[in-house]
Amino acid sequence: MHLKTTVFPSWRAIRHAAFACTVALMAAGAHAFDVTDTDGKRHRLADYRGKWVIVNFWATWCAPCIKEIPEFAEFQRAHAPDQAVVLGIALDVDDAAKTRQFAKKIGHTYPLILEDERTEKQFGKVKGLPTTVIFDPAGRRAWDRTGTVTRKALEDAIASPERPKA
C-alpha cells in the first residue's frame, strides 16, 4: 500500500520567500508612477532616469500653492529638459476645463496632471498642501515636503550630492 504524503513549507522558508518578494518589489521601483497630463502625454518615472523629477501637489483654493507655482515654472525653465522635470498634480478637479484654465492663468507652464483614484494609489494620500516630492536621478523618492517650496530650495535639493533635506 502506497501512502501519499504532503510536504508543508517550514516557517523559515515562508519568511525567506516573503523577504525575497519584498526585496523584488523594492528593486522594481515601488515608487514608480505612470500618469497622463492634460495634453494626453504620458509621464512615467522610468522614462526620466538620469534626471531629477519634482512632483508638486496643489489645489486652486490653496493660497500657498498658488504662490509657489511661479517658482516651479522658473525652476522648470532653468533646468528642463536636461537636468530635471516638473509635474504638477491638481487635487481639486470638479471641472477639468476650469482647472486647466486656472493653471494657465497663474503661470503653471509645466505638465499638469488632474488627480484621480489611480494617481492617489501611485503616490499615496497627500496629507497637506502644498506637497512636493522629489525623485533623484536613480528614481528613488528622495524628498517629501509639505509647505511652500521656492526655486532656491529646489535648486539646493538637486545640487546636493547627498539626499536633500526637507
Image (cartoon, helix red, strand yellow):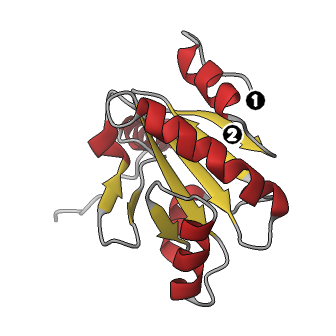
Residue 163 place in picture, x, y as percent: 60, 19
**Residue at screen point 68% across, 40% down:** 144
Res. 125 image quadrant: bottom right
- Of mark 1 and mark 2, the one earlier in the sequence is 2
Find disc 1 in the rendering and name its residue: 166
Q: Tell me whether circle 1 and circle 2 mark residues in contact (CB < 8 Å).
A: yes
56, above or below 13, in the image: below
> Disc 1 to disc 2, how far (Cα)?
7 Å
129, above or below 19, in the image: below
132, above or below 64, in the image: above
Q: Which amino acid lies under the numbered mark 1 shown in the image of this protein?
A: Ala
Q: Nearer the viewer, residue 114 or 25?
A: 114
Query: Which image quarter is the N terminus in?
Result: bottom left
Residue 109 place in picture, x, y as percent: 48, 56
Find disc 2 in the rendering and name its residue: 144
Residue 113 place in picture, x, y as percent: 48, 67
Q: Residues within 10 Å of mark 1 (few under 14, many from 20)?
A: few
Q: Nearer the viewer, residue 13 or 146?
A: 146
Q: Residue furthest left?
A: 1
Q: Residues within 10 Å of mark 2 (few under 14, many from 20)?
A: some
Assign a secondary structure to mark 1.
Answer: loop
* For residue 136, side relative to residue 127 (left or right): left
Q: Residue furthest top?
A: 161
Query: Which image quarter is the C terminus in?
Result: top right
Residue 6 appears in view: no
* For residue 129, side relative to residue 33 (left or right): right
* For residue 92, side relative to residue 83 (left or right): right
Q: Nearer the viewer, residue 78 or 15?
A: 78
Q: Which amino acid lies under the numbered mark 2 shown in the image of this protein?
A: Asp
Residue 29 place in picture, x, y as percent: 40, 41
Residue 74 appears in view: yes
